[in-house]
Image (cartoon, helix red, strand yellow):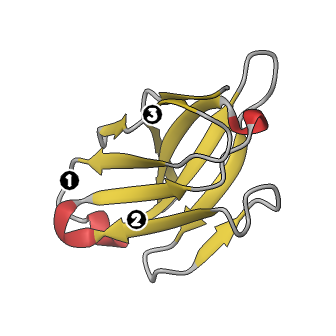
């Protein structure tokens, strides 16, 4: 079981920026597909961004042009740079790992966008 720990969440004004980080345990991080998801009370968890082991990225339409996912295999970390934040981006953000059908989730970090 791979351990994932998110950090970087907090309170920010609309139009501001935050950078989320996810630190993973293990020795084969470079082989994992990683993703960021988010969830608000009463709604199902939704995909925000993904990055494959080869570095290919994909984004939800709602965040394209504003968010950037990246990975640093030397440090076993994945990041989500969030710019031009909107009130509707408010959610708990979760880091996800996928490898050969195995899925692992972090505990989540709260992002609140409010004036």
Q: What whole-number distance in Å separates the C-alpha atoms at marks 2 and 3?
A: 23 Å
Residue 65 or residue 56, whichever sits in front:
65
Disc 2 packing (10 Å; few <14; some 14–19; many ≥20): some
Q: Residue shown at 73%/42% (left/top)?
A: 86
SS assignment at label 1: loop
Residue 85 vertical position relative to residue 3 in the rendered view, above or below = below
Q: Please count the marks in the image.
A: 3
User: Residue 54's spot in the image, x, y percent?
Assistant: 45, 83
Q: Name the residue under label 1.
A: 26
User: Residue 89's spot in the image, x, y percent?
Assistant: 70, 39
Q: Mark 2 points at which residue?
A: 32
- Quarter of image, res 58: bottom right
First in sequence, mark 3 or 1: give its number: 3
Query: Cβ–Cβ below 8 Å for labels 1 and 2?
Result: yes
Q: In this view, does 88 lie to the left or right of 21?
A: right
Residue 101 or residue 91, whichever sits in front:
91
Q: Which mark is residue 104?
A: none
SS assignment at label 2: loop
User: Residue 111's spot in the image, x, y percent?
Assistant: 55, 31
Q: Which mark is residue 9?
A: 3
Q: What whole-number distance in Å separates the C-alpha atoms at marks 1 and 2?
A: 10 Å
Disc 1 packing (10 Å; few <14; some 14–19; many ≥20): few
């Amino acid at each position: 079981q791979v351990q994932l720990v998110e950090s970087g969440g907090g309170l920010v004004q609309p139009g501001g920026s935050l950078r989320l980080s996810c630190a993973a345990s293990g020795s084969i991080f470079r082989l994992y597909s990683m993703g960021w998801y988010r969830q608000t009370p009463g709604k199902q968890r939704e995909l925000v961004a993904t990055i494959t082991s080869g570095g290919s990225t994909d984004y939800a339409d709602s965040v394209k042009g504003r968010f950037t996912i990246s990975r640093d295999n030397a440090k076993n970390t994945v990041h989500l740079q969030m710019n031009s934040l909107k009130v509707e981006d408010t959610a708990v953000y979760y880091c996800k790992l996928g490898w050969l059908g195995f899925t692992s989730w972090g505990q989540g970090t709260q992002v609140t966008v409010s004036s």
